Image: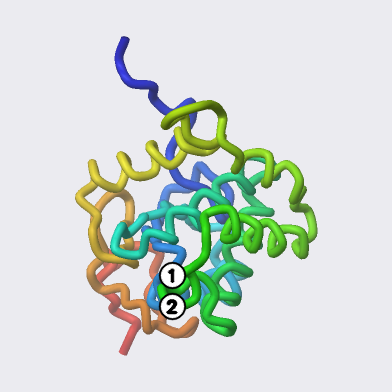
């Protein structure tokens, strides 16, 4: 049989689907630059442009931070168990813990077991409104012997396959309507995002209002 394919489009929407403009954010959940971009978009940009643009998050696991896989698994478990809104809040909380408390960085996680990291992530999930932490914990359990994986292993495979097929390596990377927008920087402020978005593609995304 052929390999399984996802039942719906890969990625998780931050704003309503079906808009003419689709902005895909390829992010690693243990990356300081991805964190900076996500916080600005989630905290300040979505309120103005979320009804005009379809923002979609794609998770990019970077294997040189092996603990990152567990963080990515937890995020997908939140999404699958509790929906996209809960996912967006969980990702925001994950980045806050990463930046403010050093959670899931190499030095924080080096001597921790997989189970200990899952427990930390589930404890974080329990603090977020709309997240069923027990359902998340259940999705992170092994599904069988050997290399059966967890309840979100297949979702991880699809996420990895998607960014590999798109040729994404660096995080964050931003695509607009399927093509890379190299102009976008992780250091952009909300004002810069809004100046870039304001023409709504009329300038072919050249940043004519960035100044």
The residue lying toward the viewer, choosing from 191 and 186, is 186
Residue 45 visible to the viewer: no
| Above or below for 107 versus 130 | below
Outermost residue, top direction?
A: 1
Check disc 2: other Cα within 10 Å, few if <14, some if 14-19, many if 20+.
few
Residue 125 visible to the viewer: yes
Mark 1 and mark 2: Cα distance apart in space: 6 Å
- Return the mark for residue 33: none
Outermost residue, left direction?
A: 167
Q: Position of residue 42 (x, y in %)?
A: 57, 69
Determine whether, in the image, residue 167 is placed left or right of residue 123.
left
The quarter of the displayed image where residue 142 is located = top right
The residue lying toward the viewer, choosing from 2 and 9, is 2
Write down the residue under mark 2.
107
Q: Position of residue 81 (x, y in %)?
A: 68, 40
- Return the mark for residue 110: 1
Determine whether, in the image, residue 189 is placed left or right of residue 160.
right
Determine whether, in the image, residue 30 is placed left or right of residue 164.
right
Query: Which part of the image, by quadrant, shows the N terminus?
Result: top left
Check disc 1: other Cα within 10 Å, few if <14, some if 14-19, many if 20+.
few
| Above or below for 189 versus 116 | below
Query: Which part of the image, by quadrant, shows the C terminus?
Result: bottom left
Mark 1 touching mark 2, by CB under 8 A?
Answer: yes
Q: Residue at x 54, y 26 (%)?
A: 144
Q: How many marks?
A: 2
Q: Position of residue 165 (x, y in %)?
A: 23, 41
Q: Residue at x 68, y 39 (%)?
A: 138
| Above or below for 61 versus 134 | below
Q: Secondary structure at mark 1?
A: loop
Q: Secondary structure at mark 2?
A: helix
């Amino acid at each position: 049989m052929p390999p399984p394919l996802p039942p719906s489009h890969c990625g998780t929407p931050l704003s309503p689907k079906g808009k003419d403009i689709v902005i895909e954010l390829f992010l690693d959940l243990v990356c300081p630059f991805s964190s900076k971009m996500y916080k600005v978009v989630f905290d300040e940009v979505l309120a103005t442009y979320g009804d005009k643009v379809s923002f979609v998050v794609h998770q990019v696991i970077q294997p040189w931070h092996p603990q990152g896989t567990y963080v990515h698994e937890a995020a997908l478990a939140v999404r699958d168990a509790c929906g996209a809104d809960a996912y967006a809040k969980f990702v925001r909380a994950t980045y806050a813990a990463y930046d403010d408390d050093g959670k899931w960085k190499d030095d924080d996680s080096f001597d921790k077991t997989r189970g200990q990291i899952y427990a930390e992530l589930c404890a974080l999930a329990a603090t977020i409104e709309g997240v069923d932490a027990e359902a998340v914990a259940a999705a992170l359990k092994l599904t069988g012997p050997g290399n059966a994986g967890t309840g979100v292993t297949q979702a991880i495979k699809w996420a990895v396959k998607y960014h590999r097929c798109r040729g994404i390596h660096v995080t964050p990377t931003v695509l607009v309507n399927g093509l890379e927008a190299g102009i976008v920087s992780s250091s952009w402020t909300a004002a810069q995002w809004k100046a870039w978005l304001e023409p709504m593609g009329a300038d072919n995304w050249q940043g004519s209002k960035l100044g």
